Amino acid sequence: MARSSVPSIVSAECLPRPVLPSTALVAAAPRAMVQPAGGGALITTQAELESYMLSGRETASGASVSPDAAMRTSVVYGSVRIISGAVANTPIQMKRRVDARTRSDAGDDPLARILCKPRKGRLTPSAFRRMLTAHLILRGNGYALIVRSMGRVIDLIPLHPDRMEVEQLDDLSLKYTYTRKNGRQIVIPQEDIFHLIGLTLDGYRGVTPITYAREAIGVALTTERHGASVFRNGASLGLHFSHPNKIGNEAKDHLKASLDDYRGAENAGKSIVTEEGMTISPIGMTAEDAQYIETRQFTRTELEMFLGVPGFMLGDTEKSTSWGTGLEQQGGSFRAYTLEDYYTAWEETIARDLIADDSDLFARFNRSAIVRADLKARWEAYVKGLQWGVFSPNEIRALEDENPREGGDIYYLPPNTAGKSDPSSDKEDGNEPPKAP
């Protein structure tokens, strides 16, 4: 049987209208009315359908979780902002392999202008990397359409991962089906897709971290709603009113008016006037009794583990030694175990999707730029690089965006006899490097 060409998910406007018999009146079959704002959802992709269906299924905590809902929690939003911002702000450089030991700058290559230089009418390189990295964190995949001219890459257009479907064919090639906003589906060849993949279990699609963290995020959302409800109702979970006899209608009205005046965090601490000998006692648990603060703390720690961000970077300084014994070690662990994962994914995807197999080009993130904000650490590294002949003064000046100076292209000998051509010579050569502070 021939395979149907009708897409599995299409919008209503793509479906043919039924043809009524000539004897039928128009009033007998009214056309669909325009859905008012807030009265429904337009579903045009499989991902949108799954997200819409998921919103109707609650987690064990009672909250519905989607990537957009997850971003409303401070831990998820802060983690996405920190990771994507670090990737976006780290300079990416195009290099060319001259031989096995020599590399040269390839900033004049057309691909470098796409990845490193802002262009009119397009996202800046940092905004492009920030967007796709955020997609990678929340959806497990990041997509961009590759536009080529005469075999050269001339543009990268980001595509939303919720509108992309990936299928592995029998020959192990990939089929990318993208759904436009009008519901029309188009098939894009594999060679025209820039595809960032996170943690994957099938080899061609990244898993969505939010799916595995749904319960933890649901607890965070429910806890925040609980806190908001507590403050909205006057920071009290409830009161028990006791009357010695049957309360009268007039006393009931007065009590209701008094409670309405008391409700709200701005009215906390006000007194309530009781009627006819009525007594008041608290019921239920207070926020402290329910360990509200401890619950929020545990949820933050759990989400930090899912997303790979140290707690101190999110304002959580409790029990944060699992990343190291100090802030410096924790920051180094974040760069080694979290950022390096995203740097490598970008570099290898650029090499696979944008650069020919026989080319000597490659892209590299400048990891040293991460410590630019730490002036002391940066200059200590420069001094050691000079002492051991790793850098010349002009190379360091270039890293600091300074012009070269005359005589600055020399490399100092290491501060021991191993680097001298004549170790027995104690004669000063006037080429001493600066001393470490």
Image (tube, rainbow, N blue to C red):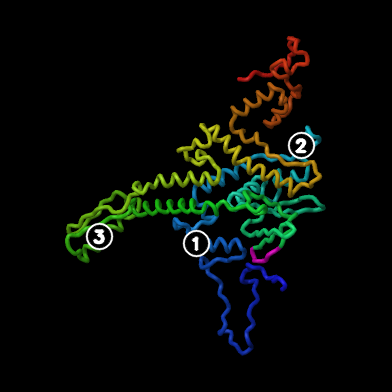
The residue that appears at 66% across and 68% down in the rendered structure is 7
Q: Left or right: 376 with respect to 192?
A: left
Looking at the image, tell me whether mark 2 or mark 3 is earlier in sequence order: 2
Q: Secondary structure at mark 2?
A: strand
Q: Nearer the viewer, mark 1 or mark 2?
A: 1
Disc 1: which residue: 57
Q: Nearer the viewer, mark 3 or mark 1?
A: 1
The residue that appears at 44% across and 58% down in the rendered structure is 62
Q: Quarter of the image containing the C terminus?
A: top right
Looking at the image, tell me whether mark 1 or mark 2 is earlier in sequence order: 1
Q: Position of residue 292 (x, y in %)?
A: 39, 47
Where are the magenta residues, as a range? 181-186
Q: Left or right: 300 with respect to 434?
A: left
Q: Amino acid at mark 3?
A: Leu
Q: Which mark is residue 15?
A: none
Marks 1 and 2 close (CB-CB < 8 Å): no
The residue that appears at 73% across and 9% down in the rendered structure is 426
Q: Which mark is residue 255?
A: 3
Is 307 located above or below residue 259 in the figure? above
Residue 389 is covered by the magenta coloring: no
What is the crowding at mark 2: few (fewer than 14 residues within 10 Å), some, or many (at least 20)?
A: few
Q: CA distance from mark 3 to mark 1?
A: 40 Å
Is 262 located above or below residue 37 in the figure? above
Is 156 located above or below residue 34 in the figure? above
Q: CA distance from mark 2 to mark 3?
A: 79 Å
Question: What is the quadrant of residue 94 in the picture?
Answer: top right
